[in-house]
Amino acid sequence: MPHNTKYVFVTGGVTSSLGKGIISASLAKLLQSQGYSVTIQKLDPYINVDPGTLNPYEHGECYVTEDGAETDLDLGHYERFLNVYTTQANNVTTGRIYQSVINKERRGEYLGKTVQVIPHITDEIKRRIKLLGTKNKFDVVITEIGGTVGDIESLPYIEAVRQLKWELGPTNSVFIHLTLVPYLSASKELKTKPTQHSVKVMLENGIQPDVLVLRTEHPLTIDVRKKVALFCNVGLEAVVESIDVSTIYEVPLLMQEEKLDEFVLRKLNLPMGKAPELKVWKQFINKLKNPKKHIKIGLIGKYVELPDAYKSITEAIIHAGVSNECKVDLVFIHSEEIVADNIAETLNDLQGILVAPGFGHRGIEGKILAAKYAREQNIPFLGICLGMQCAVIEFARNVLGYKNANSTEMVRSTPYPVIDLMEDQKGVTDKGGTMRLGAYPCRINRSSKAFEAYKTQDILERHRHRFELNNNYVEDLKKHGMIATGINLDTDLVEIVELESHPWFIGVQFHPEYKSTVINPHPLFVAFVKAALSLLK
């Protein structure tokens, strides 16, 4: 008997950034806790093939999956909530859809027909949605459509899921529409008209939402719920409140209180077990809200005006803080603002320094100064990707005496290229999807701080980089106290460096933040926060 996958489609109206990804992840968490196998897919309307070439100011963090896909940051939320890996198939973009259709047309697969948005583009969208469920035999696939209903870019996706609703049959799909109910302080009223207009746009596109999730700053009154139900053609039980909360990790509990999971299971004709206890989840939130200690960690980066640019790092720090029963105040510090004259004043009240990943020369000297300050002042330090490379450059300049040491990414003609382009990156001219991406193995030295954190010698971590530590300098660095404690045995790539004489100073070429989840906080972040705690008086 074929596996019958059910589908939940999540759309948004009124305004963007309402939290469709968090609602999708929360519902998935609740269904998973009922014993169902669930995954979430993001359909992104932009024409870029993936966010790999997008400026973080444009789109926030580019999240990397285990199989090396550069994806939307919402996939990070999916993994953190579900504790299950996503893949390339979990993120679909308009660029990818059109690229696939055009390639088929060039190969003559459409037999000379005129290629059109309907049916060819919509058919490809439907194929991608169904493939994820049937190939992996998931019970439920939650598909989040990016952007806002009414956007011209979203129309092919809306039409595709409208067709799917008809093709799948009445008990195999549910439509959840997320809108905003603004509060007018002058009249002290919650206004439902934007929601009504948003649903009207959905109806014009041929879709009647089954559930309305209303984002609000104030509790919904019964009158507001009745009004929305009446004018948007849904039952009262299908009007769900999503009120602002102090942490995104409370949203699954809110959705459980609102019985969103029960409603969805009924509509999908799936049996309902006992209400999920979410015991571990509740313990996590309790520790998050009741920390025993407070520490400050500085995140040194160049996109700090937009915290979403470092979303996985901020969440990994939250997970590690909870694991250590402490509240971590993450202080975002722009690397361009760090200069030798003000560094002590800028960084002196921190218990830990994290130098963030990034690309390009802007702000690089500030990152190098931050690494120097952490080294000299014995402050726990974690350098990620470019952050690790900055620590190596700083050490080479100020300890080895190679005054003009640098990365060839910043200065091609540097006399001491301690960081250099990877061999397999030489000759690469295309920017998109050509970096070293995805999970690679690393062997850790047993007598290292990294081994103390991981408690195992062999690890798999995700990468996103073109440049690496130049092996010609490994011995020189070692002689002066910077040890390569993690190596990829296949390529001899240095993955981890540590300072011998420092209480806790680790640089990693990979991105540990991508693999931290609520249930499994990343051991490196846990150890980093623990080391920072030791600095408290």
Image: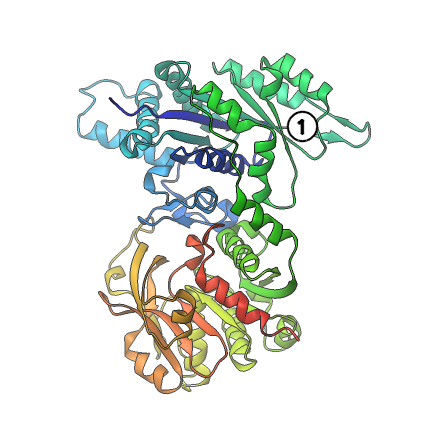
| 345 sits left or right of 66 in the view | right
> Does residue 84 lie above or below 322 as drawn?
above
| 119 sits left or right of 352 in the view | left
Q: Residue at x 24, y 59 (%)?
A: 427
Q: Residue at x 33, y 41 (%)?
A: 88
Q: Is residue 507 visible?
A: yes
> Does residue 267 lie above or below 72 as drawn?
above
Quadrant position of residue 428: bottom left
From the viewer's side, name the closer residue of 489 and 446: 446
**Three-letter code for the amino acid on which mark 1 is drawn:** Val
Q: Residue at x 47, y 74 (%)?
A: 505
Image colouring: rainbow
Q: Can you give x and y, in whole percent of width and height, for residue 70 in the image? A: 37, 47
Q: Quadrant of the C terminus?
A: bottom right
Q: Can you give x and y, in whole percent of width and height, for residue 150 in the image? A: 52, 24
Q: Quadrant of the N terminus?
A: top left
Judging by the rendered image, the residue that carries numbered circle 1 is 181
From the viewer's side, name the closer residue of 282 and 453: 282
> Does residue 105 lie above or below 491 as drawn?
above
| 451 sits left or right of 369 in the view | left
| 311 sits left or right of 419 in the view | right
From the viewer's side, name the closer residue of 118 and 224: 224
Count residues near mark 1 (Cα–Cα under 10 Å), then give few for <14, some for 14-19, many for 20+: many
Q: Can you give x and y, in whole percent of width and height, for residue 90 in the image? A: 37, 38
Q: Can you give x and y, in whole percent of width and height, for residue 437 in the image? A: 32, 54
Q: Is residue 149 visible?
A: no
